Image (cartoon, grey):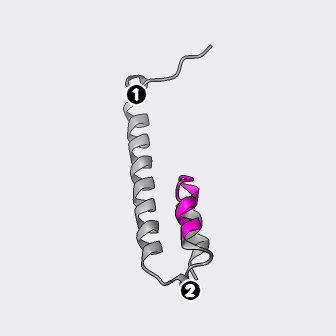
Amino acid sequence: MKQKKRWEDLTPRQRALIVAGGAVEAVLTTVALVDLARPPKRLVRGPKRWWLMGFAVQPFGPIAYLALGRR
């Protein structure tokens, strides 16, 4: 059985890519949350609470909201 890699086992490039991906995901989610909070209900496709729950599915929830959830 293959052992899982630990952080120390990763190359500096792999570490940088993981950190960058996490930062992009955090920014994307923050942008989507702020955008969801601002407009009135009529400018959002579907209930806001459903979109909010969808944000838990990273990174697809925020991307789906930003692409499809706004009118």
Numbered badge on residue 54: none
| 19 is higher (above) or lower (below) than 60 | above
Which range is magenta?
Answer: 49-61
* Pointer 2 residue: 42
| 55 is higher (above) or lower (below) than 71 | above
| 37 left or right, relative to 42 | left
Identity of the residue drawn at 42% across and 79% down: 38
Q: Residues within 10 Å of mark 2 (few under 14, many from 20)?
A: few
Check disc 2 and report its element: helix, strand or loop: helix
**Residue found at the far top of this picture:** 1
What is the x, y in percent for residue 3? 54, 17
Q: Earlier in the sequence, mark 2 or mark 1?
A: 1
Numbered badge on residue 7: 1
Identity of the residue drawn at 38% across and 43% down: 19
Q: Nearer the viewer, residue 58 or 3?
A: 58
SS assignment for the magenta stretch, majority: helix
Identity of the residue drawn at 62% across and 75% down: 46
| 56 is higher (above) or lower (below) than 34 | above
Q: Residues within 10 Å of mark 1 (few under 14, many from 20)?
A: few
Q: Amino acid at mark 1?
A: Trp
Position of the C terminus by quadrant:
bottom right
What is the x, y in percent for residue 13? 40, 36
Q: Quadrant of residue 66?
A: bottom right
Tell me the mark number nearer the camera, choosing from 2 and 1: 2
Q: Amino acid at mark 2?
A: Arg
Q: Is 12 a magenta residue?
A: no
What is the x, y in percent for residue 54? 57, 60
Q: Quadrant of residue 53?
A: bottom right
Cα gap from disc 2 to disc 1, whole angstroms: 46 Å
